[in-house]
Structures are given as C-alpha cells and as structure tokens.
Amino acid sequence: MVSSAELLAQTGTALHRVDQVPACVDLGEVLRYLGYPVGVEPNSHLQTILDDWVSETSRRAIPRAVYIVLPVTQLRPRSLRLRTPAGDAEFHGAIGEFLGASECVAAFIATAGPEVERLASELMQRGDPLAAMIVNAVGAERAEAAEAMVIEQLREQAQKCAFAPTLPYSPGYCGMALTEQRTLFSLFGDYDVGVTLTDSCLMRPLKSVSGLIGLGPAERVRAFGSPCDRCELYNCAMRR
C-alpha cells in the first residue's frame, strides 16, 4: 500500500516551477526591511520617494521559484536524509530537530530576478543610497512573495492527503550552516533555476531565498508546534 508521503512525493523526480506571483507589493514588508517599527509610517516626502521606487522595482522584478518534493529516509535531531534519484542527500544541523514531524520535504529556491540587484547597484554608483535601500527592500519582499507561493502550492497538495507544511528553514539560520546550501542546490542537478551559488555559498541574484519545508500529517505538524518556541535565539529576525 502506498503511503501518504509517497503519494505526495510521487513527482519528486520532477521540478515544479512557480511563475505566477501576485504583482501587489506588501508595503508593510518593505517598511520592515527598511527598519521601520510596526505602526510607524514614513513622512510625506519619504513616502513619495518610496512609492516611486516601489513602483519601478516591482516593474523590473521577475519573482520566480522552483521546488522539488522528496521523501525522508532518515530524520534525527541533528541530521536529515532525503531520497533522490541519484541517491540519498544528507543535511546536517538542528534542522533535523525542527522538521521532526516531516515524512517528506520540499527544497525550494526563490528569487526576485537579476534586474533588482542591477538597479540597486546602479543607484549606489550614482550616489543614491536611499533609493538603493528601497530597491533592495522591495527585492527581498518579491523573493519572499515567490516563497509564499511555494508554500501555498504545497499546502494545497498536502491537504489532499491530510498533510500540512512546516515553517520554511534556510541554510544559515535555525542551527543549519550556510554551507548546507551546496547540498540543497545539488538536489536540482544541472537544471537552471535562475540562481547560482558562489564559492562562499551566497546566492546570486542576492535577492533570493532558499530552504526546506517539511510535510507531515497535519495533526503531528500542529502538535509539534513552532520550533521558534524552543529556540534560545530570542532576537532572531526569523522568529515567528
């Protein structure tokens, strides 16, 4: 008998694309990236500048994402092993504990596209750091909007077999070393995902995000709760 996890991961050898991302920019997220406290609004002069560059950046951005769903073959507090067509791929770090309710895992890469980084660089060269900051903030929001679409698609797929997604976890956070990016990117083989990895494991374009999303029985995922509640990094920007 085929398990729910196997049903969910039955297309695990196929790469899924997200090409349709809502065009509306979340201005609250942009302000958060710019360092504004919740409830604080920019003055009218800054709001005009903000509106102009949000509009221009959203016009140039091409938010996209790719993901692949793979079954878990081994899950320990400090390691996670996934079955791939080329053999098992293993991740190390506290991520193994955080995905404790998972029976399969989706690896994803999302980006705002190369034009955002290019525009921010041009603005810095022209001596306009404020505009560059706004462009980068919008780029971060656009990459996360693509990530959100991945989560939404996974949630829809998971509901069909009474599964649910966990929070996403990215290399460099939550006790997982940045170097785990190499393993994550290797899951996509030679496929051009629109994002490359530097020798220092940084992504280009810079306004990109990658990570792992666990998928498990909905009741177990809810019972497991948020690992942020057990994490001692109380000032972490990723805390949810």
Image (cartoon, grey):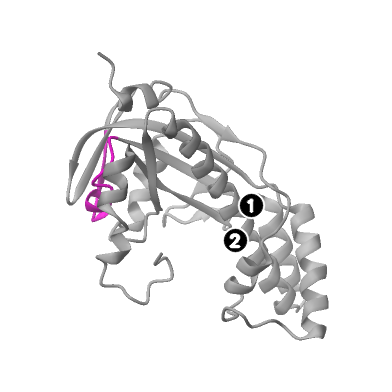
Whether label 1 touches label 2, CB < 8 Å: yes
Does the stretch in magenta take in 191? Answer: no
Point 53% across, 30% down: residue: 16
Q: Badge 1, how many Cα within 10 Å: few under 14, some, many 20+?
A: many
Task: Look at the image and give the residue range highlighted in magenta.
Answer: 89-103
Of 6 and 177, the residue lying toward us:
6
The span from disc 1 to disc 2 (Cα, nearest Å) is: 7 Å
**Would you name the residue on which mark 2 appears?**
140
Query: Which quadrant: the C terminus?
Result: bottom left
**Would you name the residue on which mark 1 appears?**
112
Point 53% across, 42% down: residue: 152
Q: Is residue 188 shown to the viewer in this render? A: no
Residue type at numbered disc 1: Ala
Q: How many marks?
A: 2
Q: Secondary structure at mark 2?
A: helix
Of 184 and 46, the residue lying toward us:
46
Residue 12, label in figure: none
